Amino acid sequence: MKAVILAGGKGSRISEESRFKPKPLVEIGGRPILWHIMKLYSHYGVNEFIICCGYKGHLIKEYFVNYNNTGRVSYFDLEKMQTSIDAEEKFKVTLVDTGLETLTAGRLQKIKPYLDGEEEFFLTYGDGVSDVDISKLLEFHRKQGKCVTITTYPKEERFGCLKLKENLSEVESFHEKNKAEAALINAGFMVMNKEVFDYLGNGSEMLEDGPFEALSGAGEMAAFTHNGFWSPMDTLKEQMYLDNMCRANSAPWMVWK
């Protein structure tokens, strides 16, 4: 099973770092946050990754070229370059240029050919870390039988909001932030069935807009509740917070240690 990572945004809120590199390459604990996300999935046996590149995507390619030379990547596909080596980390990486200005629904559309034959896949953003149990998330998704499962987390109002049904396992509605209400938000660790591509329209929207609204309206979005640790890395303050956790050896998301 593959994990798709959205890594094409400009990261304007953390411009101190993203002027020089894409946000997924901003480091915490001496490693890009992208690496931390991949390590979480790998801990649960998910080692195949499709990375949706955009802003400064050539630097992500350079990172993996150099990483590949260390002998830590088992398979690497970069513009038809392939390699297979005795790997320390069993990562299998495919990088796809999904465009500079493409919104997230369009980025997902563009990697559809790389999911040929896959009935389901993981999707996450390349700028947040969590100790979410990936195995339990997948088990929950399969039990619920919905097209999409998102991981929910209580968070501040600047994120898109969602409302759960009475059973607390299905999403009733998904909408943009409302300052007047406390919010459960999408923490970004998702499982999707291949039918999700039927909801993406022409790819001109953010996933959280029309596609997620349509999925929740059709009763096709389940909610996996996570009460552990989750943090985005949208600002320099958040980057320093996560970096300090790593350096103090107290990072909850580093479950592989």
Image (cartoon, rainbow, N blue to C red):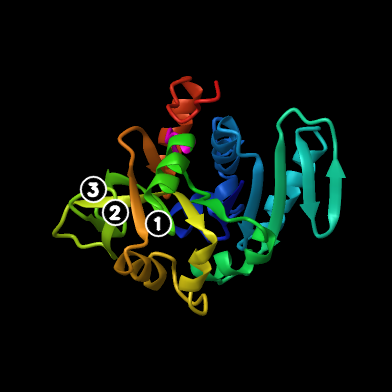
* Cα–Cα span, label 1 and label 3: 14 Å
The image's mark for residue 85 is none
Q: Read off the residue under disc 3.
A: 168
Q: How packed is label 1: few (under 14 Cα within 10 Å), some, or many (20 or more)?
A: many
Residue 250 in the figure: left or right of residue 153: right
Q: Where is residue 241 in the image (x, y as percent from the top left)?
A: 40, 34
* Cα–Cα span, label 2 and label 1: 9 Å
Kind of residue at disc 1:
Lys
Q: How packed is label 2: few (under 14 Cα within 10 Å), some, or many (20 or more)?
A: many
Q: What stretch is highlighted in magenta?
A: 129-134
Of pointers 1 and 3, the one earlier in the residue sequence:
1
Quick one: SS at disc 2?
A: loop
Q: Read off the residue under disc 1.
A: 146
Q: Is residue 136 above or below residue 147?
A: above
Q: In this view, does 131 lie above or below 11?
A: above
Q: Where is residue 157 in the image (x, y as percent from the top left)?
A: 24, 54
Kind of residue at disc 2:
Glu
Q: Read off the residue under disc 2.
A: 170
Q: Which residue occupies 76% across, 38% down?
A: 73
